[in-house]
Image (cartoon, helix red, strand yellow):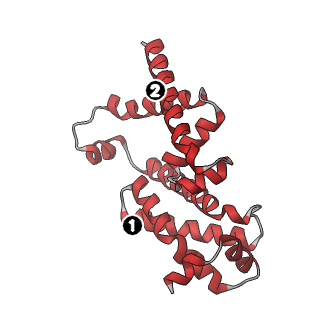
Amino acid sequence: MAQQVTTVQDSDLVSRVLQGDRAAESNLYQKYSERILFLALSELHSRPDAEDVRAETFLRVIQALREGRLRKPDSLSSFLVGIALNVIREHTRQRAGQESLTDREEEIGGAASPESVFYDDEVANSIAATARHLKPREREFLRLYYYEELPKDEIARVLGIKTERLRLIKSRALKNFREIYKRNRRADT
């Protein structure tokens, strides 16, 4: 059965779900379930939380597909990852609102100072500012490659380029990112 699931085209799955085919919904879950779970685990580091995110993601995706809200059926995998990332962010925000600074210190190991908790936000802001200075294609490549962790052929398709060019784009994007990041950090000090 798993072999059959992986050979079903995304566009076929989308149209079958839109027509109310429950088996297609099951195939969709089987095809992408592990990928979404892995993504959630890598972000949340908690299996129960990751499983909650996976369930919520598929509920939202299937509802969106039933309502015909996916414009490009061939971009189903990107659509799924995008929704999963939104659910992860919502989960993280809810959890952050429920835990105190002391809880976070205990989670880190008890040795964290209040300043070190905010340091991560400072670094994240610096990285975001650096990314804004990259060329749009470089920024999009880095997002797809590192954040969404899409396969190279999918990234090439989204960017509209040949797979062979990805190595060059990755090299240039990382080089430019390092240079801009160093410049920004020196300007801040």
The residue tagged 1 is 48
Q: Which of marks 2 and 1 is in front?
A: 2
What amino acid type is highlighted by mark number 2?
Arg
> Looking at the image, is 21 positioned above or below residue 112?
below
> Which residue is located at x 59 percent, y 56 percent?
154
Residue 160 drawn at (x, y percent) = 69, 48
**Residue 126 visible:** no
Residue 13 drawn at (x, y percent) = 67, 76
On residue 85, which mark appears? none
Q: Quadrant of the C terminus?
A: top left
Find the residue positioned furthest to the front: 164
> Which residue is located at x 54 percent, y 74 percent?
31
SS class, disc 1:
helix
In the image, 187 versus 5, the foreground residue is 5
In the image, 72: left or right of 177? right
What amino acid type is highlighted by mark number 1?
Pro
In the image, 102 versus 152, the foreground residue is 152
**Residue 114 visible:** yes
> Which residue is located at x 53 percent, y 38 percent?
168
The residue tagged 2 is 178
